[in-house]
Amino acid sequence: MITAEKKNGKLVITADLQKPEISKSGKSYVVASSKGNVKTDLLIDGKPVIIGLNAYISINK
């Protein structure tokens, strides 16, 4: 789950961590992902903020 909020003029994104799994490219381990773009409840100028998020660990080969 991805959530977003505005705190002290900053965008704060919260994402659930997952067990590291190999990415489709095989070059990294994914630890959090929105799995595409996600519309959040956070509004800026009356419009929802949309987030696309990937957090990963690089695999050094």
Image (cartoon, rainbow, N blue to C red):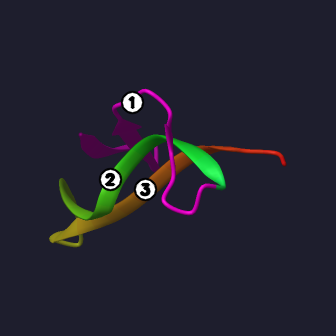
Specify the quadrant of the image occupied by residue 25: bottom right
Q: CA distance from mark 2 to mark 3?
A: 5 Å
Q: Which residues are magenta?
A: 1-26
Which marked residue is nearer to the observer: mark 2 or mark 1?
1
Magenta stretch encompasses residue 24: yes
Which is closer to the viewer, label 3 or label 1?
1
Seen from the viewer's position, the closer of residues 15 and 10 is 15
Relative to 41, is 14 on the left or the right?
Answer: right
| Residue 7 is a magenta residue | yes
Secondary structure beneath label 3:
strand
Residue pictured at 46% horizontal, 50% vertical:
9
Residue contact between numbered discs 3 and 1, judged by CB atoms under 8 Å: no
Task: Work out whether 38 lies above or below 47.
Answer: above
Q: Is residue 55 above or below residue 52?
A: above
When the figure is inspected, residue 26 is found, relative to residue 19, above or below; the finding is: below
Query: Is residue 34 found left or right of 32 in the rendered image?
Result: left
* Residue type pointed to by label 2: Ser
Mark 2 falls on what kind of element?
A: strand
Residue tagged 1: 18
Name which of mark 3 and mark 1 comes first in the sequence. 1
Residue bearing the label numbered 3: 53
How many C-alpha atoms fall within 10 Å of the one at disc 3: few (<14), some, or many (≥20)?
some
For the residue labelled by badge 1, is the local secondary structure a helix, a strand or a loop? Answer: loop
Distance from Cα at disc 2 to Cα at disc 1: 11 Å
Which residue was labeled with disc 2?
34
Which of the two discs, 2 and 1, labels the residue nearer the N terminus?
A: 1
Q: Is residue 14 left or right of residue 49?
A: right
- Count of numbered marks: 3
Percent x, y for residue 59?
73, 45
Q: Residues within 10 Å of mark 1 (few under 14, many from 20)?
A: few
Pick the residue in front: 59 or 55. Answer: 59
